[in-house]
Image (cartoon, rainbow, N blue to C red):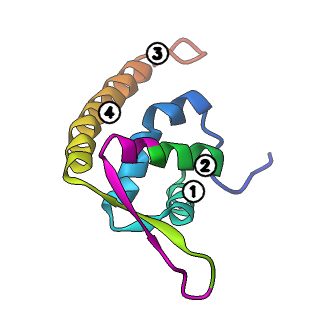
């Protein structure tokens, strides 16, 4: 038996379904910047989110009014764009988060009922 280190490679379609909410949840913890958001998502077990996915998503969240951004000079390096959740983003996170939890619970219950390969539950 072999073991692998690191988070599982979640199917892309699963991540697409929850990534907006996951990013909002990370930003809701406190003002942060893109690289840190990606690192936090990876640290939480969602795996690596590429910049080509994360930064356009952040731009869409900003366009929708769910987050705001400010540019800050770096202390010892390049400047960074910092993101903060807006009241509208917090409402979206609360409402869609509740819907996601209900959906995940329903799906989990459904899959729990599926017989195993041996024909038992």
Question: Is 62 included in the stretch rendered in magenta?
Answer: yes
Residue 68 % position (x, y): 34, 57
Q: Nearer the viewer, residue 49 or 33?
A: 33
Question: Badge 2 is on which residue?
Answer: 49
Question: Badge 3 is on which residue?
Answer: 114
Question: Is 69 included in the stretch rendered in magenta?
Answer: yes
Report the residue at 38% width, 19% height from top.
110
Residue 5 % position (x, y): 71, 57
What separation in Å lies between label 4 and label 3 (alpha carbons)? 21 Å
Sequence-wise, the earlier of marks 2 and 3 is: 2
Where residue 100 sits, quadrant-wise, is: top left
- Mark 2 lies on a secondary structure that is loop
Crowd rating for badge 3 (residues with CA inside 10 Å; few <14, some 14–19, many 20+)? few
Of marks 4 and 3, the one in the foreground = 4
In the shown orientation, is residue 73 left or right of residue 113?
right
Sequence-wise, the earlier of marks 1 and 2 is: 1
In the shown orientation, is residue 54 left or right of residue 52?
left
What separation in Å lies between label 2 and label 4 (alpha carbons)? 20 Å
């Amino acid at each position: 038996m072999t073991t692998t280190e690191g988070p599982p490679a979640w199917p892309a379609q699963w991540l697409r379904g929850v990534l907006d909410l996951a990013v909002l949840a990370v930003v809701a913890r406190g003002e942060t910047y893109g690289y840190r958001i990606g690192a936090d998502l990876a640290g939480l077990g969602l795996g690596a989110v590429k910049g080509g996915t994360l930064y356009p998503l952040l731009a869409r969240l900003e366009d929708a009014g769910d987050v705001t951004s400010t540019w800050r000079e770096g202390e010892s390096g390049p400047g960074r764009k910092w993101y903060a959740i807006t009241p509208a983003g917090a409402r979206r996170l609360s409402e869609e988060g509740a819907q996601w939890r209900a959906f995940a619970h329903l799906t989990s219950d459904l899959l729990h009922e599926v017989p195993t390969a041996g024909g038992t539950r």
